[in-house]
Image (cartoon, helix red, strand yellow):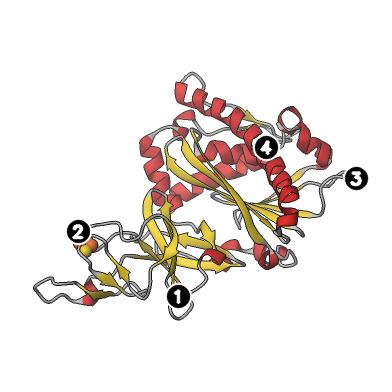
């Protein structure tokens, strides 16, 4: 453990930042819509017309595979009178995307194909779907609402791409998901994830599996990601690689499977915690073992959510405003808070 006795503790962000609707609106404009957000996985989008629809940062969106094999993302809104084009979830749209309200149809590229029985000429180029960015990385599908507003996905991932190269994500298949809606701000959750000061108190199972005294979180400030190291105990976890990419991508990679997690902010002090478990072997014979591994990992998240729900309640209540961060254990929390401040200070997106 490095000597941090000379370092002054930093102050946390003010409690108001975790509950204020105006703050949330600023974060939505400056962060959630401008960063790549994990949305789904590629296996759900196997052939032309396959789509996945859902929400991202409060926007109904969908991603669809075109005849050319490319993925494209759109707001899930018809240009006629704003109907939701595709139902939420995964499905097949066919050769055209047909609106269920008045039957306008769109191509997979988003171009208006036909304004059925409209009664006046329309310029298809003026009535296409609102596009967003969509890209794939190693079987994971990411979207970015503010189309074209920044680096491509691989550049955005930065060194993570090379560091994760020898983990066989492509050979792993989806096994199960665990989504939980919780009354916790996205920053409250992130800050808990980015320190292990609490591990000894909250995570006995985790401490049994890894050498908590040697747990480290490297801050890669300019690339805005964190590399979490957890040396295994004898007989504990196998080789693993753990990342947190700002604002809320969590990758836990193993040779035999992965836990891929993200946060969908739903409002001030409210998130959906989304976790997918992938395994190399998803045969029925392995199902019980896989389920146990996934539940073991989900239990650690439950332990965290239980405590941070109480944290959020106190941030909402208004007695506590700010606290001090441990220079020994909470430097990554401070770095995360700097990233939030910097993102909010950045110039606004072009759209
Ligand atoms: S709202 Fe889609 S066709 Fe009318
Ligand atoms: Fe934790």
Q: How many angstroms separate mark 2 from mark 4 (CA)?
A: 45 Å
Q: Nearer the viewer, mark 1 or mark 3?
A: 1
**Viewer-proximal residue, 209 or 153?**
209
Q: Is residue 129 above or below residue 204?
A: below
Do callouts 2 and 3 mark residues in contact (Cβ within 8 Å)?
no
Please indicate whether residue 184 sits to the left or right of residue 116 in the image.
Answer: right
What residue occupies the far front of the structure in this picture? 284
Q: Is residue 199 above or below residue 74?
A: above
Say which residue label 1 marks: 48
Say which residue label 3 marks: 234
Q: How many angstroms separate mark 4 from mark 1 (CA)?
A: 38 Å
**Viewer-proximal residue, 328 or 107?**
107
**Residue located at (76% from left, 44% from top):** 216
Q: Is mark 2 within 8 Å of ligand 1?
A: yes
**Residue located at (74% from left, 35% from top):** 328
Quarter of the image where one finds residue 20: top left
Sequence-wise, the earlier of marks 1 and 3 is 1
């Amino acid at each position: 453990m490095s000597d941090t006795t000379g370092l002054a503790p930093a102050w946390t962000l003010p409690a108001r930042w975790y509950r204020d609707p105006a703050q949330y609106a600023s974060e939505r404009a400056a962060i959630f819509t401008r960063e790549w957000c994990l949305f789904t996985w590629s296996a759900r989008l196997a052939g032309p017309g396959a789509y996945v629809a859902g929400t991202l940062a409060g926007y109904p969106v969908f991603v669809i595979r075109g005849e050319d094999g490319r993925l494209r993302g759109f707001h899930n809104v018809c240009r006629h009178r704003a109907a939701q084009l595709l139902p939420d979830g995964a499905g097949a749209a066919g050769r055209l995307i047909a609106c269920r309200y008045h039957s306008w149809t769109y191509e997979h590229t988003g171009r208006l194909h036909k304004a059925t029985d409209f009664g006046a000429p329309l310029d298809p180029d003026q009535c296409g779907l609102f596009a967003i960015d969509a890209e794939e990385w190693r079987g994971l599908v990411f979207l970015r609402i503010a189309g074209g507003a920044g680096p491509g996905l691989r550049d955005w991932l930065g060194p993570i791409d090379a560091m994760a190269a020898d983990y066989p994500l492509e050979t792993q298949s989806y096994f199960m998901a665990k989504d939980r809606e919780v009354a916790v701000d996205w920053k409250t959750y992130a800050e808990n994830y980015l320190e292990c000061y609490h591990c000894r108190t909250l995570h006995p199972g985790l401490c049994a599996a890894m050498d908590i005294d040697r747990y480290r979180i490297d801050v890669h400030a300019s690339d805005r990601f964190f590399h979490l190291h957890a040396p295994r105990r004898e007989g504990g976890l196998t080789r693993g690689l753990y990342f947190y990419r700002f604002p809320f991508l969590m990758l836990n990679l193993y040779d035999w499977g992965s836990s891929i997690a993200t946060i969908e902010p739903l409002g001030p002090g409210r998130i959906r915690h989304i976790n997918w478990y992938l395994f190399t072997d998803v045969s029925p014979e392995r199902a019980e073992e896989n389920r146990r591994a996934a539940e073991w990992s989900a239990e650690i998240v439950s332990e965290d959510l239980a405590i941070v729900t109480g944290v959020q309640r106190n941030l909402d209540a208004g007695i506590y405003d700010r606290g001090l961060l441990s220079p020994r254990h909470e430097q990554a929390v401070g770095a995360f808070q700097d990233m939030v401040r910097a993102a909010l200070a950045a110039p606004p997106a072009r759209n």
